[in-house]
């Protein structure tokens, strides 16, 4: 298996710090998407800086561009939001750290696969802080944890990735399960993956009593190692 932590060559490395914004309360999904798209449009016009926006949403499901109707198992459970990011159905809710990542790949590398690899490396580095080995799997988007044991083969997804790119500016991003209600994932087939032995987990489910502040600090350190420096920015 390819080691996702292998550093990528960055001939156009962009050293300017990325604005790092952390929300302390839940953010309405539609409002968040509107704010993110507005910021991306401003970046394309050269009127805004790169930004990573960390937040939580109220309980909801999102349907990506390849979502299949049969994968919405309980359509009346939570609001369902169509979204233009790649991927299928995902869940967002309290206890899950969502990071909307708005980077200008023209100033970095104009390589979508390499960008996704960097997102994977960012998550894996974050998990490593807490002694959790995150892994990637061919044909399965996101980051996984091997929970196999004697007589049992099991892998659980701990982080989802869904991206969109407009004129080489990225948006949407990652969702890392810290302490969400894992039962909320049963209303969908997460990311369309329903094979036996595959499930969903979180840091707390893995026996790590981690706070959201702990995770934010680890995300910051790992982001710096993969993408470069950040600067703390107060949300407007």
Image (cartoon, rainbow, N blue to C red):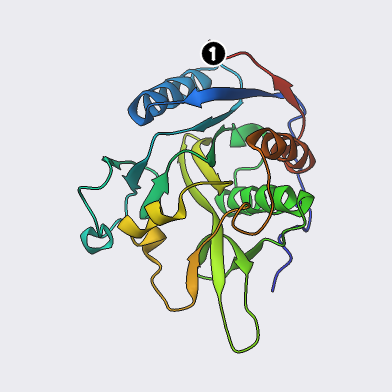
Residue in the foreground of this view, choosing between 80 and 168: 80
Q: Position of residue 73 (x, y in %)?
A: 25, 60
Look at 21% across and 58% down and name the residue there: 69
Examine the rendered structure and indicate whether residue 66 appears above or below residue 148.
above
Q: Is residue 157 left or right of residue 72?
A: right
Residue in the foreground of this view, choosing between 11 and 20: 20
Examine the rendered structure and indicate whether residue 99 appears above or below residue 67.
above
Residue in the foreground of this view, choosing between 146 and 227: 146
Q: How many marks?
A: 1
- At numbered mark 1, what does the secondary structure look like: helix, strand or loop? loop
Examine the rendered structure and indicate whether residue 152 appears above or below residue 16.
below
Look at 24% across and 55% down and name the residue there: 74
Quadrant of image for the N terminus: bottom right
Q: Position of residue 144 (x, y in %)?
A: 59, 63
Quarter of the rendering containing residue 62: top left
Q: Position of residue 191 (x, y in %)?
A: 40, 59
Q: Is residue 217 visible in the rendered structure shown here?
A: yes
Q: Is residue 12 visible in the rendered structure shown here?
A: no
Q: Is residue 167 left or right of residue 154?
A: left
Q: Position of residue 5 (x, y in %)?
A: 76, 57
Q: Which residue ends up furthest to the top in the rendered image?
A: 236
How crowded is the residue under tag 1: few (<14 C-alpha within 10 Å), some, or many (20+)? Answer: few
Quarter of the rendering containing residue 145: bottom right
Where does label 1 land, which residue? 47
Look at 68% across and 35% down and name the residue there: 216
Quarter of the rendering containing residue 35: top left
Q: Is residue 206 left or right of residue 85?
A: right
């Amino acid at each position: 298996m390819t080691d996702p932590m292998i550093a990528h060559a960055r001939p156009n490395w962009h050293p300017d710090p990325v604005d790092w914004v952390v929300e302390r309360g839940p953010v309405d999904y539609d409002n968040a998407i509107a704010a993110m798209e507005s910021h991306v449009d401003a970046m394309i016009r050269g009127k805004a800086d790169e930004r990573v926006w960390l937040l939580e949403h109220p309980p909801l499901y999102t349907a990506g561009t390849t979502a299949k109707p049969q994968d919405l198992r309980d359509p009346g459970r939570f609001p369902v939001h169509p979204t233009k990011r790649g991927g299928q159905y995902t869940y967002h809710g309290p206890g899950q750290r969502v990071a909307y990542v708005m980077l200008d790949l023209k100033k970095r590398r104009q390589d979508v696969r390499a960008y996704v690899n960097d997102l994977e490396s960012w998550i894996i580095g974050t998990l490593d802080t807490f002694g959790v080995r995150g892994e990637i799997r061919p044909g399965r988007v996101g980051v996984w944890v091997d929970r196999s044991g004697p007589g049992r083969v099991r892998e659980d997804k701990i982080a989802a990735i869904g991206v969109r790119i407009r004129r080489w500016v990225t948006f949407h991003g990652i969702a890392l399960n810290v302490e969400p209600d894992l039962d909320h994932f049963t209303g969908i087939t997460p990311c369309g993956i329903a094979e036996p032995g595959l499930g969903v987990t979180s840091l707390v489910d893995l026996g790590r009593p981690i706070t959201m502040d702990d995770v934010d600090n680890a995300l910051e350190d790992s982001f710096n190692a993969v993408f470069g420096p950040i600067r703390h920015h107060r949300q407007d």
